Image (spheres, rainbow, N blue to C red):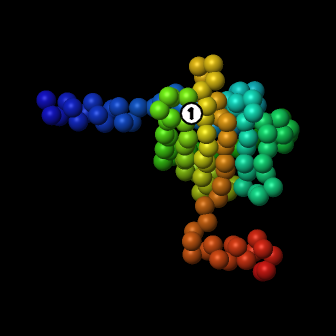
Amino acid sequence: MRWFSMVLFASISCAQTPADAVLDDWHKAAAVADEARYFFHFAPNGVFLGTDATERWTVSEFRAYAKPHFDRKKAWSFQPHDRHIAFSPDGTVAWFDEALDTPNLGPARGSGVLVRLNGAWKIAQYNLSIPIPNSLAGEVVKMVAGKK
């Protein structure tokens, strides 16, 4: 009986939530350059924060930026892993972070907020970042400040 309880717990803890499914499909849509499917996953007032400090895009702004990539059938391919999702007590908001393997940025991180609208999870905010090791942070800060 104890073995069964442990297996059941492991199965539940590894189960994919509907919020996970949305994020996974969103990443897959980018990888196959499916613009309509990719932007379908955003909330109407969603925001995408890119790696550059100037990159704060509304959905329409981000779509305009991304359109040439999708038109060329070469968007981006992020492979998520180590994702963590937490849900509000009423189940209408989720916040997450995920490690990403990317061919052009190297290791990256995505974090954000999902909201439940009309029964479906939508991306309200996505923040793409490049984690900088603490041992390199001082040099990066100097470079960004233009001191080097």
View extreme (top): residue: 118
Q: Measured from the top left, where is residue 93 in percent x and y?
A: 56, 33
The residue under the point 59% across, 57% down is 107
Q: Measured from the top left, where is residue 73 in percent x and y?
A: 78, 36
Mark yes or no: residue 83 visible: yes
Q: Measured from the top left, where is residue 140 in percent x and y?
A: 69, 73
Viewer-side residue, 32 vs 29: 29
Report the side of 90 relative to 78 (left or right).
Answer: left
Viewer-side residue, 104 vs 122: 122
The residue under the point 73% across, 41% down is 47
Report the side of 73 relative to 86 (left or right).
Answer: right
The residue under the point 78% across, 36% down is 59
The residue under the point 57% across, 68% down is 133
Residue identified by numbered label 1: 93
Mark yes or no: residue 66 visible: no
Q: Amino acid at mark 1?
A: Val
Q: Is residue 34 above or below residue 74?
A: above
Q: Quadrant of residue 142?
A: bottom right
Q: Quadrant of residue 11?
A: top left
Tell me if mark 1 has few (under 14), some (14-19) or many (20+) residues whose alpha carbon lies within 10 angstroms of its own: some
View extreme (left): residue: 1
View extreme (bottom): residue: 148
Say what secondary structure mark 1 lies in: strand
Report the side of 10 relative to 145 (left or right).
Answer: left
**Screen quadrant of the C terminus:** bottom right
**Screen quadrant of the N terminus:** top left
